[in-house]
Image (cartoon, rainbow, N blue to C red):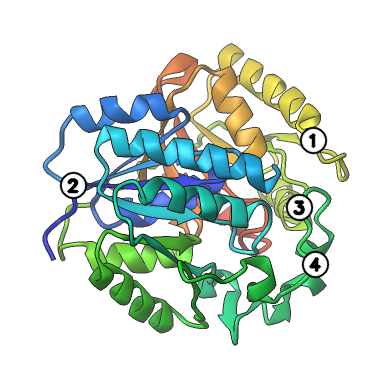
Amino acid sequence: MPPLLCLGLVADDVTGAGDASVQFAKRGWETFLILHTGHARGRLLAGSSRPCVIAVTTDSRALENDTARVLTRDALTQLMTAGIDHVFLKIDSTMRGSIPGQIAGALEAWRTRYADARAIVCPAYPRMGRTVQAHRLFVQGEPVERTAIGRDPVTPVKTSDMNVLVPVSPSVTIADAASDEALAVLAASIAAAGPSAIAVGSGGLAEALAGALTTPNAPVESVARVRNPRVLLLVTSLNPVSHAQVAKLREVFPDVAVVLAPAERVGNWSVAERLAGEFSSLVERERWDIVGLIGGDGARAALDRLGASGIRIIDSILEGIPFGVIAGGRADGMPVFTKAGGFGAEDALVKVIERLTA
């Protein structure tokens, strides 16, 4: 099929927007993660000879479904006004948060253009251990409710039954996928269905859809390496995976500076905001070659504090860990990577620093 003009990607947090949109950047798409939908039109009007992705976050994961519906509807409506012609709704790969509301909002907006709009839902990301089999969600082979996600302090997932997590209707279809090959087949069917179909999934489905829609041999920008970089990380995720990764990083790269969330926190933004303030002050006071944002709430808060309009996404460092440069504000042009809290092996942050070092 011919290249797309532009795909609008709506996510429920910053790190999710990054790890889904980077799948298109890896295939040569011009890719921007914006913090506010008002910036979308400017990005599209800037013009490009390549297909593009405009990704925006609603920060709606921990909100009630009704609120998430309105935020998602309004975000997608703004992207439609800016000129996007296809939609990807990025949801959490472990089904945390207000996903029914997000889907309802996306359908509400997209039906103003396509009366027959429907959502095809599959959060699977096999390379990150997330699979959907017989309409049940598994993380590393375990039903999701038996993992740390079932005990998440903000958005716990209490069942692996996708039919409970996303009530099926004539306009909502749940799809299984336990492998990359299954996701590729699903993505091909979504592409063939045309723009009325809303793909709803995580970075796994985004990668498969990017492959289904991309012309082979598209030019891809490479990640720059730095000799002996000064690195500053903001880690607001409470997921034990993130804390184990930081501990391993400190063993191997003790000079990396880390602003770290406490082991436990009440489910609100107060600590994330405080840590984001500490992080942004360090960014403004000292010279850093690379910054990293781990955890969606803190990533958004930090970028807002710095006055950024978003991130221009370039490529992946590791699976689920996009790399780009901050756009606008007091850290304009600064290299940055983002990561969801629960993603990656224990040595993921070690490998990130190794791959960014000349």
Q: Position of residue 19 (x, y in %)?
A: 48, 52
Q: Is residue 226 left or right of residue 243?
A: left
Residue type at mark 2: give it.
Leu
Mark 1: few/some/many CA within 10 Å (<14, 14-19, 20+): few
Residue 172: tell me if it is visible.
Answer: yes
Residue 18: tell me if it is visible.
Answer: no
Q: Write down the residue under mark 4.
A: 158
Residue type at mark 1: give it.
Asn
Residue in the image at 49% along x and 54% along y: 90
Which of the pair 346/10 is nearer the observer?
A: 10
Q: Are marks 1 and 2 in contact (CB under 8 Å)?
A: no
Q: Write down the residue under mark 1.
A: 268
Q: Which mark is residue 155?
A: 3
State the separation of the CA atoms marked 4 and 1: 20 Å
State the separation of the CA atoms marked 4 and 2: 40 Å
Residue in the image at 69% along x and 20% along y: 277
Compared to residue 170, the image places residue 310 above or below, namely: above
Q: Position of residue 156 (x, y in %)?
A: 79, 58
Q: Are marks 4 and 3 in contact (CB under 8 Å)?
A: no
**Label 2 secondary element:** loop
Compared to residue 25, the image places residue 46 above or below, namely: above
State the separation of the CA atoms marked 4 and 3: 9 Å
Chain-order first, disc 4 or disc 1: 4
Q: Write down the residue under mark 2.
A: 5
Residue type at mark 4: give it.
Lys
